[in-house]
Amino acid sequence: MLLSDLITNTEDHNKQTDSLTEYYVTIHNDRPLEMAIEIMDDHKVDQITLLDENDQFVGTLKKADINFYCSGLEENEKLQIFSDESSQCKAIEAKFRDAKATFNMLGIAFCEIVYVGEVQIIRWLNAEAMITFGVNIDDPISKMLTPEIWDDLMQIFHTHGGVEHERIEVNGRVYEVTLMEVELLGQRILKLFLYDVSELVRLSDELRRSLERTIEHIAHYDSLTDLPNRLLLVAKLDHGISHSKRMNGKVAILDLNIDHFKDINESYGYAVGDAIIVQVAGQLASILGREDILARIGGDEFIIVLEDLEDILKSEEAVKKVQALFANSFTVDGVDFKLSASIGLAIYPDDADNSEMLLKNADIALHRAKDEGGNNYCFFSSEMSVQLFERVLLERELRHGIDTSEFLVYYQPQISLATGKLTGAEALVRWKHPVMGIVPPDMFVPLCESTNLIIPIGEQILRDACTQVKLWKEQGLFEGRISVNVSGKQFERPDVVQMIKNIVTQTQLEPRYLELEMTESVLMGNPALFGRKLSELKMLGIEVAIDDFGTGYSSLSYLKQFPIDKLKIDQSFVGGIPHNEQDMAIIKAVIAMSQALGFRTIAEGIENEEQAEFLKNFGCEQGQGYLYSRPLSAEKFEEFLKALV
Ligand code: C2E
Ligand code: CA
Ligand code: CA
């Protein structure tokens, strides 16, 4: 049903609007239907004329039609359901606060123009003003406005060079005044506009009340599902908690989040996402008792409040019901969606004694459930908040560290196992914290990944490493490649190839001297897309190595479809030389297969000669590890390079 379907189009609308029973109104098509009806009620009319944003007539909306079509609809349905993209009413705009619309709505003349000459004699006025004020041309202005009002206006006029929107009262009606000086036929005269705003003043109260009712609803209920929002939830929860306090009962909060919901919005669009949210809301409501509260507090985040629990086990029963609900799929437009949810639980009074903390703790538990892979539930425990506190502190320090350039690049040499010559280096990030000193990446890279801070940090490391290596090359100190780690979060970015390209261009490092290290699991995240990105990098001449090889999917034949140059045997296998037969068998197999597929190989974590010897004997080309050197600061690495020449 479109708004346009409800509109009776009349060619002859000018004739209609001339009659006093006809009202102009502009309504945003996003307004609740009840508001259109309220406006009609307010003005004791049964239909309103609809105008578009250019005040062009669109048609007439009849109360009877709305009532007829909307009997099955919820009160707060939006006018929008009567309109769609193609509807001619798309442009209908809210102009409630716009005086013109209000005047239009009332169908009254709103403007009276008066010219006042030098001796305060009215030189010209329109017919409307003549009738309203009972004055004539050549009457003094004081016959129209009292001398006091006129004096006041003149004072404002002289101090401010004009009068704008001053309100005055004449004969019980309220006018808005604009007064300015103009030249007419070589004569200096004052031009006075008087807008009768009496109706507006009265009407705005009524309109304000009706708007307030709507705003009140919007403020407390989610517009998509009509469930209570966070504000109302907290109010209800406060109430529930004080009730349970008196009854010595418990309150359980279930913080529910749909897993990977973002993907649905991204792949199917927000309309489908919204439809699913509405279904989930409806089904959740159906499994809850009358006393329970269900609220929507974010995109795909719902809160269930179970009051007066005698037993915490009851909250687990609710979890089971929710899980059972998600065992079935949700259908939108004939497409089935198999979804799962994660739930975090917090209990009053065990986990907190106020709404805010309970919600916060349920949220912490929710994140734990998500971290454990989703489709899961988790009760809050106090250790969680300590861990979270540490995380929050660390994250703050990290952000600060980015602003103050605390991230440095260390360099670890890579060596040809056959000749012992330098073939390149790996760039490894270090955090030089003002208090903690040099912090190794294992302490902060995981948090950087989950907070996306790895994106700016990784970019900076890449830029710094390229700049530095370019310099060493110019000085004839460094011959090989620089290997830089790229995290999944970075590689996911649509602009990652461009970012790398820019850095290579800006630093003028020849692309063939740059190698990127990525783990298999990163590539498996989206093989088709990431394969294309790798090909683009390849075309620039940049090389790619698979880091930590052997710890992930390790499907060599699968890897073959990517344009890869090098495999990096993980240090855990190298550490197994010479005692762990299995590790050694894996190393031999990896080297052999890698050679067959045309990849180069490097082994990381080489700590002694025996390991180097073993790897060399089985055909591994390069090595990296403490045996040759620990990762070194730029200064130290420069000394290391100088010692080689
Ligand atoms: P990774 O890429 O596997 O880096 C190799 C790690 O092994 C480095 O640890 C290095 O110091 C260490 N290592 C090198 N030789 C030996 C050895 O002989 N014995 C032992 N036991 N360890 C050795 P580091 O520098 O602490 O880096 C740890 C991890 O942090 C890296 O593992 C990498 O996953 C990540 N990382 C480091 N820098 C960056 C970066 O710039 N960006 C990203 N995304 N991740 C980075
Ligand atoms: Ca690496
Ligand atoms: Ca590694």
Image (cartoon, rainbow, N blue to C red):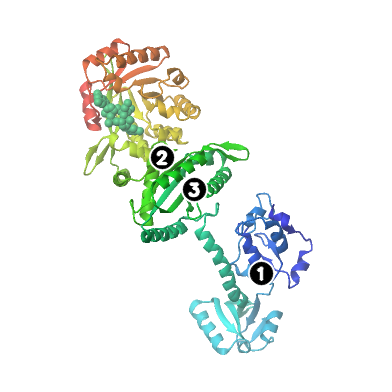
Looking at the image, do the residues carrying marks 1 and 2 touch, with CB atoms under 8 Å apart? no
Can the viewer see residue 20 in this picture?
yes
Q: Residue at x 66, y 50 (%)?
A: 84
Decide if residue 303 is on the left or right side of residue 484: right
Q: Residue at x 41, y 14 (%)?
A: 598
Comparing 543 with 139, the one in front is 543
Q: Quadrant of residue 570?
A: top left
- Label 3, secondary structure: give it: loop
- Label 1, secondary structure: give it: helix
Q: Earlier in the sequence, mark 1 or mark 2?
A: 1
Residue 48 in the image, given as x and y percentages of width and height: 70, 65
Quadrant occupied by the C terminus: top left
The residue where tag 2 is placed is 370
Badge 3 density bin: few <14, some 14–19, many ≥20, Cα 10 Å: some
Give the amino acid at mark 1: Asp
Give the amino acid at mark 2: Lys
Q: Nearer the viewer, mark 2 or mark 3?
A: 2
Decide if residue 119 is on the left or right side of residue 457: right
Badge 1 density bin: few <14, some 14–19, many ≥20, Cα 10 Å: few
Tag of residue 299: 3
